[in-house]
Amino acid sequence: MTAQPAEKNLPARFVFTGRVHPERAQVSINLPGRKCTIIDKGCGISGEMSTDISCSQICVIYSSETGVVDILTLKNAVEDAIRLQLDILGYVLGCGYDAEITQAIALDTHEKHVFGVGIPVIEQRKNQNFEQILNLFNVDESDYLRRCLADLREAVKTPKDTGEFCYRAIETLRKFFAQQNGLDDNKRDECNKSWEILRNELVVERKELDEIAVFAVDIRHGGTMLITSDNRARIFGLTWDIVDKFIAYAKNGYKRK
């Protein structure tokens, strides 16, 4: 959902609520009076948030003097900020936690936003059959697809790292073509050759891969970048197109039709 254009330059206050997973861990982080600044002018975000986590229930109050252009992008930024706190706690305790923001309420207008669990651009596709994909996992080659799908799970769960995980999922498929053609990944020319084979076998344009890489390469080398909900939708669409082609390739006995 997007805030009305007439309101985007007005002050805005939201309450975000959600939960920590696993919920049974009963995580509590209470920092009275402590606020976190969230700024990303490229994404239209500039404000501050205060957080309370009690018994794994998350409550965040976000305030901005410049309004909110895209509530989904803001939700992702808030979720990432909560994940940082949970990652610190997880590091201290040796635990693995995750965060899920489920809804937001505008304090000034009482408008409620309930966030779904999926990615709309993917939910609309409905062009794959669960059982047919499951049937692919009876040969050694399927491990590449397994690791690809695991990366896509993380791309959906972790908005800020969407590009990195989507690109890594595709790189896993490239590894398949390298292995199948006896190419040495440690040799640049042979690594490049495996990318060429992937593009040819799956009929993928290099510019599509480059578009995903923009949101992946710098991040994987220690950089940081906020990503808008529109950017995510575009990256997901490109990535799912490529993985769909690989699944069709696998269904055909790992060869082109």
Image (cartoon, rainbow, N blue to C red):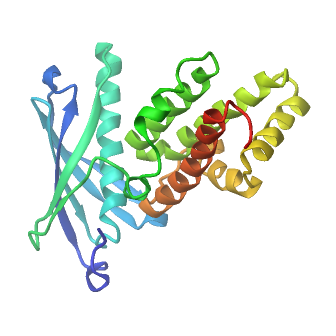
Closest to the observer: 6 or 192? 192
Compared to 253, does 96 lie above or below? above
Closest to the observer: 97 or 120? 120
State the image coordinates of residue 59 (x, y, percent, origin top left).
14, 45
- What's the residue at 18%, 65% (across, down)? 13
- What's the residue at 74%, 35% (across, down)? 255
The answer to whether residue 222 is visible is no
Compared to 224, does 187 lie above or below? above
Looking at this view, name the residue that lies furthest to the bottom: 6
- What's the residue at 71%, 27% (across, down)? 176
State the image coordinates of residue 232 (x, y, percent, origin top left).
48, 55
To which quarter of the image does residue 11 belong? bottom left
Closest to the observer: 222 or 136? 136
Compared to 94, does 37 lie above or below? below
State the image coordinates of residue 180 (x, y, percent, origin top left).
78, 24
Q: Is residue 129 left or right of residue 190?
A: left
Q: Is residue 238 left or right of residue 80?
A: right
Closest to the observer: 18 or 244? 244
Q: Quadrant of the N terminus?
A: bottom left
Q: Quadrant of the C terminus?
A: top right
Looking at this view, name the residue that lies furthest to the right: 189
Q: Is residue 19 left or right of residue 75?
A: left
Q: Is residue 127 left or right of residue 52?
A: right
To which quarter of the image does residue 193 belong? top right
Compared to 186, does 40 lie above or below? below
State the image coordinates of residue 43 (x, y, percent, origin top left).
44, 64
Q: How many marks?
A: 0
To which quarter of the image does residue 156 belong? top left
- What's the residue at 47%, 51% (across, down)? 127
The answer to whether residue 213 is visible is yes
